[in-house]
Image: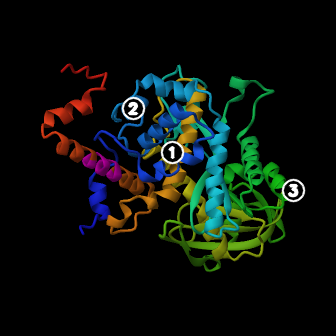
Amino acid sequence: MQILTYDRIKSLGGGVMYPIVKYPSFIESNLLRFEHIFNKCQKRHFAEYLTGLLVSKKKNISSMNSQFINHTNQSSKNHFLTDANWDNKQLTNERIAIVKEQCGKQHIKDGFLVIDDSITHRTGKHIESIDWFWDHSKNAYTLGHQLVTSQYVTPKFHIPLHFRQYHKEDEVGKEQFKSKLDLAIELIQEALDCGINFSCVLGDSWYFCQRIINYLEQIGKYWLFASKSNRKVIFNNRLMQLKDVVKELKKENFKLITVQQPSGKTLTVYAYSKTVRMHNVGRVKIVISFLDKPFSGNPFFLATNRKEWTLDTILSNYAKRWPIETFYRDAKQNLGLESCEMRRLKGIRRHWNLVFLAYTLLQFEAGSSSLTKWIKSNVVTIGGKCRIASCEVVRSFLFWAYEYFEKNEDPEYLFKEIVKNDHQLKIVF
């Protein structure tokens, strides 16, 4: 038996250019659970769209649609996303049901809920609800949509849960406006309402505010947030900002800590922790850390109401926030989160939901592929799992072509079957 190594899979590229004659097996096996959402025609578009998100090099409707043998006109898929009568909320509920089923199978009884936001970059000013947002990674304003999302992180997996689109006040009006903090609270409440088991919420310094802290205390959840340097605490019997606390410390106050990251990699930091009283928050445990050595570069601040946690525990738990960053990267690079070319917001939101579902199925179901028996290495990345799906699609095409060659030895006949429905080429035989 010839073994497929990960390097061999990777060499095949991140997308399929062969005609698609069959869905990846883990998509095919999951179609039944979505039958109550779609009619027969919609279910076909649903399966083809999911497959395209996983295996097509270009994630726009035209490119994905044209790769399928006997495909319909691309306007049908546009209609499926923008006008067809199916419930986006039902699709979300079924996706969350998959997450909960996996929690049961893997005996997950607790986890971390991570809140963060990201910009889906777009071009074209005529796209509905598009706006300019400050992009910290580019240090400039960029055109796009801004999403606030929740991520569920457990010892065995991490998975996106829900999303909300952030609209500026001048777009929706003062009465309809919701800040990113409002949306964060909605996402936390939605995770509670759908029965996701989590005891602690993680977030960056943007979401470390009195409003969210008060809300988490009301619902009985712990929290761990990054903190801005101007937060005031009582230290050495004086009220001072966190950045001034650093000036009170010495090198020997810092401990060398090795942090285990969710990716399996380790990170070494120098850190100091102390329980203090923080202005407008109460008693918290703060952590001050440096990457290279004490007082080298900018310090990083954390705060949590889990005052009994050790320094090592706080740092390793905050590292569990990182999967939401890798989700944004994978969703954009491998699953086309930013590739939607539709202008109407209804279709764009459905596209986002389908990307979330594609990611979920890859996390939980890609291991059921018929190709796994041929694969030597343990493929765990989303990009690697997309390549496995691509390999399976290629394999299905080769088997399909082989059957045609058995019936008719003329390669020209096979070529005609492949291109006869490509309306863009307009080939005449």
Tell me the distance, in whole angstroms, between the alpha carbons under discs 2 and 3.
49 Å
Quarter of the image where the N terminus is located:
bottom left
Helix, strand or loop status at disc 1: loop
Quarter residue 128 falls in? top right
**For mark 3, does the 10 Å Cα neighbourhood hold few (<14), some (14 to 19), or many (20 or more) residues?**
few
Residue hosting label 3 = 218
Query: Front-most of 332 and 401?
Result: 401
Instruction: Pick whichever of labels 3 and 1 is earlier in the sequence.
Output: 1
- Residue 155 lies in the magenta stretch: no
Q: Name the chief secondary structure element in magenta.
A: helix
Residue hosting label 1 = 137
Task: Name the spot of residue 188 as percent of width and height, x first.
Answer: 74, 51
Helix, strand or loop status at disc 2: helix
The answer, for residue 161, to whether it is visible in the render is no
Tell me if 118 is positioned left or right of 277 in this view.
Answer: left
Residue sitting at 41 percent across and 58 percent down? 369
Tell me if 386 is positioned left or right of 234 in this view.
Answer: left
Residue sitting at 48 percent across and 40 percent down? 47
Instruction: Pick whichever of labels 2 and 3 is earlier in the sequence.
Output: 2
Quarter of the image where the C terminus is located:
top left
Residue hosting label 2 = 65
Q: Nearer the viewer, mark 2 or mark 1?
A: 2
Magenta stretch: give its range.
Answer: 391-399
Query: Front-most of 415 and 244?
Result: 415
